[in-house]
Image: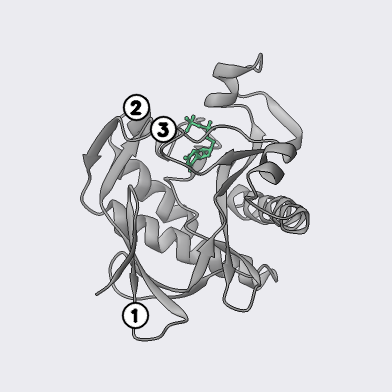
Amino acid sequence: MDIVHIGKAKTVYRTENRDEYLMEFRDDVTAFNGKRKTTVPDKGRYNAQISARLFELLEQHGVATHYKALAGDGRMLVKAVEIIPLEIIARNIAAGSVVRKYPFKEGQRLIPPVLVIDFKSDAYGDPMLNDDLIRALRLATEEELATVRELTLRVNAILKDYLNKRGLLLPDFKLEFGKARDGKILVADEISCDTCRLWLKESGQSVDKDVFRYERGDLITAYEEAAKRILH
Ligand code: UDP
């Protein structure tokens, strides 16, 4: 099959239908812009299942996504989109880079949520953007930018509520958006343990990629725990 894109943890293939791609969630895990990497069996399958469930949830709430169906272990059929090269990060609790770079305390509640937009570019190390830079680099129009901001806040509210009922806190997560052939903006990429921080409400324990980033134990045990709560 023709490859559309090979990312750090996913490969996207063309299908015989020009409006549809097949996304393969691989077992590769990377952190710190690819400086640390390993392979963890079953990781791709968990991330595909979690993403599928969360995309379905968004669709049920009227948020359009690229998700079509799961297609076997770690594989997902999606609508073909052109990815807008922005990483929209919503933060509800301070953790990770925001604690390293600004005087926030780890675990501090951020009310209202804080949105940060990074440039999706491995070559430039995903630097933070502002509206002027987005305009000057022609990464998105004013209208697209307003749309992705509003959608991210809606997605945040939906996910936070769903996860909270399953004993999970959502400190932050990253979304990507794509433009479908008809011009419509869809939530794309994935929503998984690789792209969300998820903390067990009872203990504060991480069940996400921080387990790998900060060597906090066994990654697959953590992803399994997250999947158990999110899928059932
Ligand atoms: N994130 C992501 N891809 C990236 C950068 C961040 O999925 O390239 C997610 C990350 O998993 C976390 C949130 O976005 O849930 C915020 O990440 P942060 O800026 O704190 O960076 P990190 O601590 O991961 O370096």
Point 66% across, 13% down: residue:
103
- Identified by mark 3, the residue type is Asp
Q: Is residue 211 left or right of residue 63?
A: left
Can residue 115 be seen by looking at this rendering?
no
In primary-sequence order, the first of circles 3 and 2 is 3
Label 3 beta carbon within 8 A of ligand 1: yes
Q: Which mark is residue 216?
A: 2
Q: Are marks 3 and 2 in contact (CB under 8 Å)?
A: yes
Q: CA distance from mark 3 to mark 2?
A: 7 Å
Quarter of the figure with the N terminus: bottom left
Point 40% across, 63% down: residue:
49
- Identified by mark 1, the residue type is Thr
Q: CA distance from mark 1 to mark 2?
A: 39 Å
Relative image position of residue 106 (x, y in whole percent): 58, 20
Label 1 beta carbon within 8 A of ligand 1: no
SS assignment at label 3: helix
**Tag 3 residue:** 210
